[in-house]
Image (cartoon, rainbow, N blue to C red):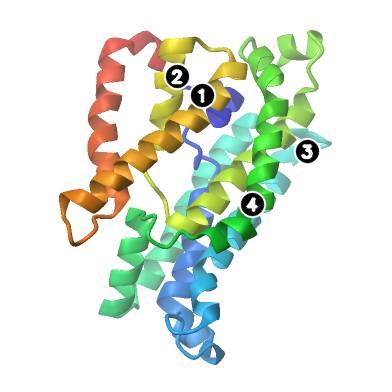
Amino acid sequence: SISQGLFRNPLADPGIIGVSAGAALAAALVILAGDTLLPFAGGLGASAWGRWAVPIAGLAGSAATTALLYVFATRRGVTSVATVLLGGVALSAFAGALTGLLIFSADDRQLRDFTFWTLGSLAGASWAKIAVLAPFLAFAAWGAARLADPLNLLLLGEAEAFHMGARVQQAKYLAIAVVASAVGTSVSVVGPIAFIGMLVPHLVRMVAGPDHRIVLPGSALLGASLLLAADTLARVVAAPAELPVGIITAAIGAPCFFWLLLRRPAEMA
């Protein structure tokens, strides 16, 4: 919802600024080249470092991508939203190309591990990891609460928001930092999970309207609920095996998104 409000585009995805791609590239470095780059780890899967390597790498990759994009898009103290959008697309493509090179040189075991991570799964989540990531998530929650009013004003346009008292540049800084913190931490632990971030804000707006004071907390609660429901289904439908939850969210989210496109085409354009 923050991405859609910042870019004033209902199709904006939380990973549109390249955060997910940066996290995926860093995770690929660990999963596909970890045995070569980190020989001291004694086997990534067997050590304590191995259990934390992918989340730490994913978080570092998302932070590095965000910092690079911020430097690229800011000139004379002003951050261009259009440059953030286009730069994020370019960074995502470049990170995808580097990830493809790593995949090309990987063996079967590494490919299987990376493929499972990219499909998304809550199997690797634990209270210990949540405790480490809690400060980043707390910052994202605080930032989202601060952004509700500025995002409402930005719906009218940057110039109009500025004349109505919004600190537009500070809101851009905070929005980019919040998206990077929330998406980067989530992707680093569970992998990229499709359609939740794009679909849920539309469902909340259909019920409650466009006010970000309602859309932001509503999206967080509804998104978490739908993800838990999808994870439960993933654990039950193929028991005793477990499907990656990303398969469930994509299979359900894609038809729902098409339904929204057909129901409200003017608003989605």
Specify the amino acid type for callout 1: Gly
Residue 117, position as x, y percentages in the image: 37, 61
Q: Which mark is first along the chain, 2 or 4?
A: 4
From the image, tell me which residue sits under label 4: 134
Specify the amino acid type for callout 2: Val
The mark found on residue 75 in the picture is 3
112 on left or right of 79: left
Quadrant of residue 158 within the rendered picture = top right
Q: Which mark is first along the chain, 2 or 3?
A: 3
Q: Which mark is first along the chain, 4 or 3?
A: 3
Specify the amino acid type for callout 4: Ala
Residue 83, position as x, y percentages in the image: 62, 36
Distance (Cα) linking label 3 and label 1: 35 Å
The mark found on residue 204 in the picture is 2
Q: Quadrant of the C terminus?
A: top left
From the image, tell me which residue sits under label 1: 218
